[in-house]
Amino acid sequence: MTTTMTGEGAHEAAPLPGVPRPASEAISTDDCSIVSRGLTKRFRGGQVAVDDLGLAVPRGSVFGFLGPNGSGKTTTIRMLLGLMSPTSGGCEVLGRPMPAGLGAALPKVGAVVEGPAFYPYLSGEANLRRYDAADPTADPRTVRARVGVALDRVGLGAAAGKRYRAYSLGMRQRLAIAAALLGPRELLVLDEPTNGLDPQGTREVRSLIKEIAADGTTVFVSSHLLAEVEQMCTHVGVMRTGRLVAQGPIASLREGHAPRVRVESPHAAQAASVLNHLGLADVRTGLDEVTAELGAVAPERVVAELVGDGVAVRGFAVLRPSLEELFVGLTGEGFDVDG
């Protein structure tokens, strides 16, 4: 289903309750495109799909909503867009409470949920014209210009007359995004936008998302692919079995994890002695290699001390935790790294 939706206005919001976030992260909810408080969805039979969710998505960010399949991401998106009612709690989109503010908020939200759906025998342009005709706020006198701009924006201007069934998977996904961008949007919501795409299609969609964000649109991207989130997102929220376990800028999430140094040397035992003398923690010795937590010691000092003590240094690196390591630590389970 492709849902084209789009709000205005903002009002003061209370601080979010008890959401795990890095201490360096201080976002006012007045500066957020999406806010939720205690958002919960419980299905018949007692299954809790989303549990006490408190999101804060900064305006202008590319926010990666990350979690394994089945962690509650799509259910959350459906509640944010008014496609599903929460059991308890609430949310605001572009400063409007949902679902009461649907009429005011959705004209400025574009969304692609659960994949594109178009008529295969119609061209890309003809399909977009039908989407545009379904929008009661759209002026039919300017449909040609709107559709042309949307197609050009996603790089499909040259393929406007081509039938949809002849489009590649990447082109189909870009057409779905074009449908979501037929009008001015402040927020774009994409549910697994690169799912099932080949590497070329993935690169095309990733590049498009960055371009849209550069124009000032907030982009909310649900994904289970770590590599995609790391390459295109500025902020993340991490889900585990329906609960939000962390959120904030990717750089801030890394701040809480100490970097390590790796020294490659044929004198591993001697190198380990130097690192211990410098006060580095968790020194581990391997075959021609030593690693340790860097702490507050400058890397330059470590190298100088090693060389000064006559340790032959073949290689030296400062290792920071990968996104995969961070999120496996947060969720206790694995993610798809690259699909």
Image (cartoon, rainbow, N blue to C red):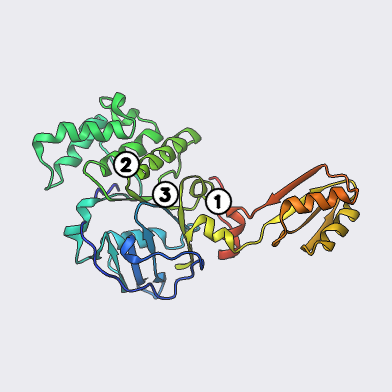
- The residue carrying mark 1 is 336
Residue type of the residue flagged with mark 2? Ile
**Which residue is depicted at the point 86% across and 54% down?**
271
Q: Earlier in the sequence, mark 1 or mark 2?
A: 2
Alpha-carbon span between mark 3 and mark 1: 13 Å
Task: Report whether 283 appears left or right of 135.
Answer: right
Alpha-carbon span between mark 1 and mark 2: 24 Å
Is label 3 in contact with label 1 (beta carbons under 8 Å)?
no
**Which residue is depicted at the point 65% across and 53% down?**
320
Label 2, residues with CA under 10 Å away: few <14, some 14-19, many ≥20: many
Residue type of the residue flagged with mark 3? Glu
Question: What element does badge 3 sit on?
Answer: loop
Any part of residue 6 in sight: no
Q: Nearer the viewer, residue 79 or 267?
A: 267
Residue type of the residue flagged with mark 1? Asp
Is 122 located above or below residue 78 in the figure?
above
Question: What element does badge 2 sit on?
Answer: helix
Task: Report whether 224 appears left or right of 254.
Answer: left
Label 1, residues with CA under 10 Å away: few <14, some 14-19, many ≥20: some
The number of numbered discs placed on residues in the rendered structure image is: 3
Task: Report whether 132 appears left or right of 210.
Answer: left
**Which residue is depicted at the point 43% across and 66% down?**
26
- The residue carrying mark 3 is 192
- The residue carrying mark 2 is 177
Any part of residue 191 in sight: yes
Alpha-carbon span between mark 2 and mark 3: 12 Å
Label 3, residues with CA under 10 Å away: few <14, some 14-19, many ≥20: many
Nearest to viewer (mark 2 / mark 3): 2
**Which residue is depicted at the point 15% across and 45% down?**
134
Question: What element does badge 1 sit on?
Answer: loop
Where does residue 265 sit, x and y in percent of width and height?
A: 85, 46
